[in-house]
Amino acid sequence: MARLKIDKEEMMPVDGPRPFDLEGWIATAPFEDLVGLVIDSAADGRAELRVPFRVKLSQGGGVMHGGALTTLADTSVAMAIKSLLPEGTIFATTELNTTFLAPVKSGWVRAVADVSRGEGRNFVGKADVFDEQEVLVARFNSNFRVARGQGFD
């Protein structure tokens, strides 16, 4: 089995500043750039993102990997939440569920997300994921929580 070579300069430091800067509050992070996510819109608790089908995002059967589809949906909900929160607010996914409905074999995939405010520091997110022919390929449900001490307790 081949060993993975890790470039230590690429590793995230345990403490200290991040080795990257985001372009803005509603912007893709390094992992999202790696996957190829594109933010088309994010405002008023709603967001639309898309990603192209690429061989590197497929699983062994030749269809888009469920993790890539879930990444698209999860990030679309996160951007919808960011559209409601002050810049710099720290929050994270605490629970998610993806139901896969149809395979994706080519083209662009689009997620449409909506969020609502739950109790306290909680947000509830939903996203529908469509292929290029507008076939519903996945449904995503999630819970997010704002970190303590940010005015949402």
Image (tube, rainbow, N blue to C red):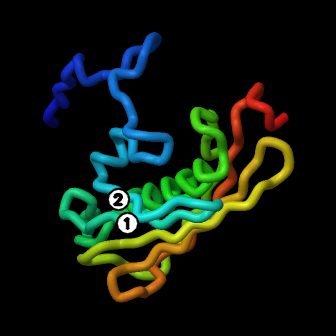
For this orientation, the residue located farthest to the top is 16
Q: Is residue 119 left or right of residue 105?
A: right
**Callout 1 crowding tier (Cα within 10 Å): few <14, some 14–19, many ≥20:** many
**Callout 2 crowding tier (Cα within 10 Å): few <14, some 14–19, many ≥20:** some
Q: Is residue 88 above or below residue 55?
A: above
For the residue pair 42 and 5, the one nearer the viewer reads as 42
Instruction: Tell me which label, 2 or 1, sits earlier in the chain.
Output: 2
**Residue 123 x/y as whole percent:** 72, 52
For the residue pair 53 and 84, the one nearer the viewer reads as 84
**Residue 135 x/y as whole percent:** 43, 87
> Do callouts 2 and 1 mark residues in contact (Cβ within 8 Å)?
yes
Q: Is residue 28 left or right of residue 151?
A: left
Q: Secondary structure at mark 1?
A: strand
Residue at left 40%, top 21%?
18
For the residue pair 65 and 42, the one nearer the viewer reads as 42
- The answer to which quarter of the image holds residue 30 is top left
Q: Secondary structure at mark 2?
A: strand
Q: For mark 1, what is the residue?
A: 50
Q: Amino acid at mark 2?
A: Val
For the residue pair 145 and 43, the one nearer the viewer reads as 43
Q: Is residue 117 above or below residue 7?
A: below
**Residue 25 x/y as whole percent:** 50, 41
Residue at left 37%, top 39%?
23
**Residue 119 x/y as whole percent:** 85, 50
For this orientation, the residue located farthest to the left is 2
Q: Amino acid at mark 1?
A: Arg
Q: The N terminus is located in which quarter?
A: top left
Residue at left 54%, top 74%?
128
- The answer to which quarter of the image holds residue 139 is bottom right
Tag of residue 5: none
Residue at left 16%, top 26%?
5
Tag of residue 38: 2
